[in-house]
Image (cartoon, grey):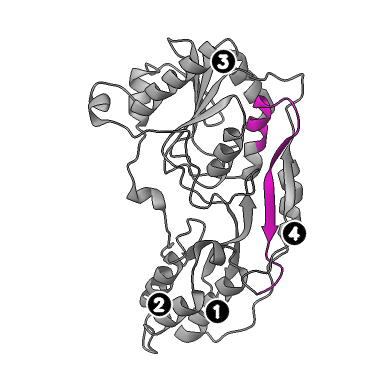
Amino acid sequence: MAMLAVLGMVSNSCMDEEPYSYDVYGNFDALWKIIDEHYCFFEYKNVDWTKVGQEYRAKLHSGMGSTELFDVCADMLKELEDGHTNLVSGWDVSRYWIWEQYPVNYDERLIDQWYLAFNYKTTCNVKYQVLSNNYGYMYYGDFSAGIGEGNLDAIMSVLASCDGLVIDVRSNGGGLLTNVEPLVGRFITERLYAGSISHKTGPGHNEFSKPYDYYIEPTSSKRVKYSKPVVVLTNRGSFSATNNFVSIMKSLPQVRVVGDVTGGGCGLPFSSELPNGWTVRYSASAIADSEGRLTEFGVEPDFKVDMDQNDMINGKDTILEKAFEVLDDMVAKK
């Protein structure tokens, strides 16, 4: 796949780290320098990493235990506001998950009960069914789970007769970018420019490679495709590879996005190790969309909608109901 080739280009971009002492200060300094030399969004996020490092290093003391050190380092990394940046020890994983600060805007039980009547087909982590209004519905909950071409044929064959299609990726926290391509390929008829990737080439905050363009190929004409109107449902939990999927789908003329801003996460993560054995993961390569924009802070929907509590009490998903309205309008204009 096209993305695999690009990932191969950037996979060796990280440089070896110089040795540091095993004590509190050595581990902290090693962490700070790894991020300083390899993190890719300093300018985009307007982060003064030197100032941040000075602030948090001042909290260290020689008698500090591992748990205290971990907490200081984790808090420093949170200054980056990056869901792909984590510190991993034997007892904890630091995280910055923006979706925890916002309404969930998704209730699986509500969908299963009131729209699918607990009667749906499922394969490769995808729920799908034809709804009573003759719109298709598919929920893809994890891009870590790939969908085989045969499985996609089975899904699309069931949904092919529908007047429109809803692809629900709310609370899909991401996974593998390469799993995005086969699904997108079902909705395009020619090679699609999906965006570009640039990686660090040196320790300076602005030392990046020339962007590598990447493309998605349409699925073979022998496979089942879908050319009718599509609505993608999103919330703040639509992160990482899902953010990428939404960005690409939004560029297609027959697609609209309904729901909340996605959770973002357009950096390719890589990992390094500290002297004490802890692992730090961080965004090392930036992915831009087809318009050259970074979507690290999320993709805006075409129609911003939040779940309404009264609707939920009455068995309605406000975001899905809006999707039906959008599809009605799109179908009427065809």
Q: Are marks 4 and 3 in contact (CB under 8 Å)?
A: no
Earlier-in-chain disc, 3 versus 1: 1
Which mark lies nearer to you, 3 or 2?
3
Name the residue: 76% across, 48% down.
Answer: 5
Q: Position of residue 123 (x, y in %)?
A: 55, 26
- Residue under label 4: 210
Which of the numbered marks, if any, corresponds to residue 159? 3
Q: Earlier in the sequence, mark 4 or mark 1?
A: 1
Using the numbered discs, state the Cα–Cα distance from disc 1 to disc 2 in whole angstroms.
13 Å
User: In the current view of this chain or complex, which residue is farthest to the bottom?
Assistant: 62
Element type at mark 3: helix
Measured Cα–Cα span from mark 3 to mark 2: 53 Å
- Picture residue at 72% right of the left edge, 58% below the top: 10
Tag 4 secondary structure: loop
Residue 268 in the figure: left or right of residue 328: right
Task: Choose the circle earlier in sequence order: 1 or 2.
Answer: 1
Instruction: Give the residue pinned by disc 1.
Output: 30
- For the residue pair 63 and 186, the one nearer the viewer reads as 186
Q: Is residue 183 magenta?
A: yes
